[in-house]
Amino acid sequence: MPLHIPDARLLLFANATLIDGTGAPPQHGDLLIRDGRIVEVGVFDISPEIPRVDLTGKVLAPGFIDLHSHSDLKVIEDRREKSHQGVTAELVGNCGFSPYPCGQHAEVVREQNAGILHGPATWPTAAAYLHDARAHSHLVHVESLIGHGTLRSAVCGRHSGPLTEQQLQAMESALDEAFAEGAAGFSTGLMYAPGSQAPFEELERLCAVVARRGKLYTTHMRSYSWQLLESIDEQLTLARSTGCRLQLSHLQAVGRANWHKQSAALEKIEQARAEGIDVAFDSYPWLAGSTVMTQLLPQSALDGGLPALLERLTQAALRSDLISALHNETAQAWGDILVSSLATETNHALIGCSIEEIATARSADPAAVILDLILEERGQINIIAFNQSESNLRQLLTHPLCSVISDGFYVDGRPHPRLYGTFPAFLGDFTRDRHWLSLAEAVRHITSAPADRLGLTDRGRLALGYVADLCIFDAETIANQATYDHPDRTPIGIEAVLRVGRAVL
C-alpha cells in the first residue's frame, strides 16, 4: 500500500531502518520532525498523539544530493525526474555552463549553452538566477556554480584569442560578485570552447578568487583519455598554487587504450590529498557518458563560435584536417558513439544508431560522417559514448573520495538513462545486487559526501537540527528501469520523498 505522509508541523516516522548518511551502520528507530527540521532521531519516548508514519521494513535516509547536474533551467519547471530517484538537492552550473551572467552577449551565451542546458533562458547575475530558481523550484534545493565558459563569453563575446588585463579583471570582478550573491562555486569545461582556450594563468587568476571566497572549484578537465594524467596534474597544480578546493568532475579513463591509466590517476589524487590539498572527485554509475557531438572535434575548430565552425566545415582543406584529427584523437571506437538527439526530422531515424552504423549505411568514412552530421544539424546534435570498463567503474564508485552523480541533461530525442535512474541504479544494481559496497556506505556517497563538498551544514545527514529532506525506500526492491533504448522509465522502490518535511513524491 502506498505510504501516506500527513502534512503536519510535527510528524513521527516510526520503526524505520535509519541510515544517517555518514556511513555508520543502519539502526532501527524513529525520527521526529517539526516545522521541516529533524528534532529527534534514534530511540526516544513518543507521545501517542503525534501523527506518525509506520516505516516497518523501509529505509529512511537523507534526501539524495546530485553534486553534478545540468538541470539549471529544468529545476525552475519542477521537472520530476530527479524526485522519482530520491533527489532533494542539485548542484547546477557544471562543466563551465551556467545561465548567468550574460553581460552584453546573451545571444552568444544562449548559443553556447543550448546543447547542454536545453533552453534559451539567461539571467544577468547569480542573484537573479538563484532568486528565480529557489522561488520556483519546489521539489529540490538548488545550489549553483558560475560557469567559466559563460563568464568568458559574457565578458568577451566570441573573442577567442588571449585576454587583455582589462578582460581578466572584468572576469575576476564578475566572479567575485557571483560569489557574494550566493553562487556555491566555479566550474570549468576545458574540453569545450571557449573554456578550452583558457591558459593556465587565466584559470589561476580566477581560482584565486575561488580560494579567497572559500568556494568550490569543479572542473571538466582538458582530457579524460590520451592526456588524462597530464590534465589531473594541471588541476592539482592549480589547487596547490591558489589553495582552492578542487572537485574533479565525472572522473574516468576514456577509451580502451587508456583504461590502464585510472589507477595512476587515483594515486595522484590520493597523494595530493595526503599532502593537504582539498581534492575529491565524482563519478556516475554508467559505462557510457553523454555530451554534444562537437566535443569530439579539436575545440579550436569552434573559435568564433558555432557559425564559424559551420563555415569551416564547408572548406575542403579545413575539413580534411578535422577528419585527420578525428581519426587520430578519438578515444572511443566508432561503434561506441551513438546519436541521441538531433535538431531535424530529416535525420530522426538516426537516433540510437552508432557512427559506425551510419557510416556503413552511407558508405562513408566515420570521421566524415561526424562532420556531415554536425553540418546537417547546424551543430545541434548530442551523443552517448561508451567510455570505460566495469572494473574501472567499480574502482571509482567504491572509492572513499567519490560522490556519485547523475550528470544528467535533457535533449530533444533520447536522453541518457542517467537522467531517470542513476540513484536507484547505484543503490539497487551496484550496491544490493553486485555487493560492490554496503548500503550505508552507498548512501554516504550520495548524501553527506556531496554535502561536505558543497559546504552544506544542514543537509545530507539524519541529525538534530538538519533540514528534513528525506528519502524513504525499500532496499529490497529499489531499482532503475531506464535503459539506453528506453531511457524515460521511472525507477521503482522509492516510497516517498520529503522536501523540508513535506512530501513531494
Image: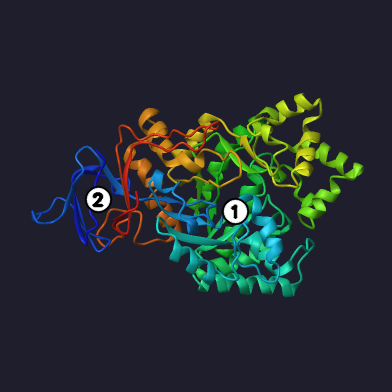
Q: Dot 1: what SS?
A: helix
Q: Position of residue 245 (x, y in %)?
A: 51, 59
Specify few, some or many for label 2: CA neighbours under 10 Å numbering under 14, 14-19, or 20 or more: many
Give the residue displayed 59% in from the left and 45% down from the top: 411
Tag on residue 5? 2
Above or below, 437 relative to 282: above
Residue 164 vertical placement versus 343 (above, below):
below
Q: Amino acid at mark 2?
A: Ile
| Image quadrant where one finds the N terminus | top left
The residue under label 1 is 117
In percent of width and height, residue 330 lies at 72, 36
Q: Is residue 380 left or right of residue 241?
A: right
Which of 130/211 is in front? 130
Secondary element at image label 2: loop
User: How far across and down, in percent of the image, does residue 223 sit?
Assistant: 66, 45
Residue drawn where x is 90% and y is 45% of the image:
315
